[in-house]
Image (cartoon, rainbow, N blue to C red):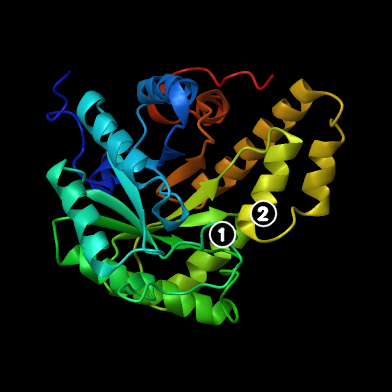
Amino acid sequence: MTDTSTTRPGTVLEGLERRPSSFSVEFFPPRGDQGEKRLWQALRETERLDPAFVSVTYGAGGSTRERTIQTTARIRQQTGLCTMAHLAAVGHSVAELRHVLSWYAAIEVRNLLLVRGDPPGDPMGPWTAHPEGITHTEELVRLARGLGDFCIGVAAFPYGHPRSADPDADLTHLVRKIRAGADFAVSQLFFAAEDFLRLRDRLAARHCHAPLLPGVMPLTTEKVLHKASELAGVDAPPKLAGELLRYSDNPRALRAAGIDAAVRLGERLLREGVPALHFYTLNNASTTRAVVEALRLGRTMSREPAALT
């Protein structure tokens, strides 16, 4: 095991300050030996690019809790990556949430992304709080803030959370999460830079100036395009969908078109001064690397832009 304590930034905010106009990546816990191998190949490839931080997701209802904790601990101990763990409140009592937060503190994971979470099985099904749990993310933020020296992130929704009554109500929830003690926010997927920038401007108008990171997923296959629409909560704009699906019979060309679209999106966002681009990787580092290299981020800043084919 390599001692990385002298080179690894302690918190997400420190990582962003050390690497302005950088990037971060999100992974999910592996299932089975092949998934484990694929994840660690992606992590090692990502580590060479020097991201500001990496995050590990947490399944609905705590379905991947142990894998999330184990994966996060291993990344924290065996790499030089600044690591952030997700924690979802759904399905957990306050006592269970305290237990998980204590685990993270014990393994020296200081960075958390806290969310209320979707019901297991049917993300759009009825949401019912655990009888001994919490109802809103802001409660989880306060709980974590009182239990350790954590750097806390929360989720933001450019199109509004599907369960919110309207965009203003959703923005109010985001403001409450930040004022409860969150240090930064990471956005859900969106398709146009204006969708994200509009949210950033509306947040600033509420006098909330915590860093807001845009969530980006290169749309390199039809399956990924449909997944992105599902996660964003809206359909991809017809112009973008047509630009990609014209290559539906040519997977290599579709991938290149998806990477090119992500690069154009990233260029616009970086010109607008975002602190970092947060990539949803689906545990595939090669696509993220192509975008990062084309944008000359991380350790690729001194290289020529990567080919997009």
Q: Is residue 200 left or right of residue 243?
A: left
Residue visible at 34% across and 63% down?
92
Please state the total of marks drawn on the protein image: 2
Name the element at disc 2: helix
Q: How far from the left and from the top, in percent, is residue 213?
A: 44, 53
Of the two numbered discs 1 and 2 in the rendering, the one whose residue sits closer to the viewer = 2
Type of amino acid at the residue the image marks with label 1: Phe
**Which quarter of the rendered picture does the N terminus lie within?**
top left
Q: Which quarter of the figure has residue 196?
A: bottom right
Residue 173 can be seen, yes or no = yes
Q: Which mark is residue 176?
A: none
Between discs 1 and 2, the one toward the N terminus: 1
Residue 65 x %, y %? 35, 47
Instruction: Name the residue located 50 percent from the left edge and 73 percent from the top edge.
Output: 202
Residue at x-position 49% and y-position 20%: 34
Type of amino acid at the residue the image marks with label 2: Glu
Circle 2 packing at 10 Å, graded few (<14), some (14-19), many (20+), is: few
Of the pair 267 and 290, the residue shown nearer to us: 290
Q: Which residue is mark 2?
A: 230
Q: Nearer the viewer, residue 195 or 220?
A: 220
Of the pair 118 and 169, the residue shown nearer to us = 118
Residue 43's image quarter? top left
Can residue 181 be seen in the rendering of this structure?
no
* Residue, disc 1: 196
168 and 56: which is toward the camera: 56
Question: Label 1 to label 2, Cα distance in Å?
Answer: 17 Å
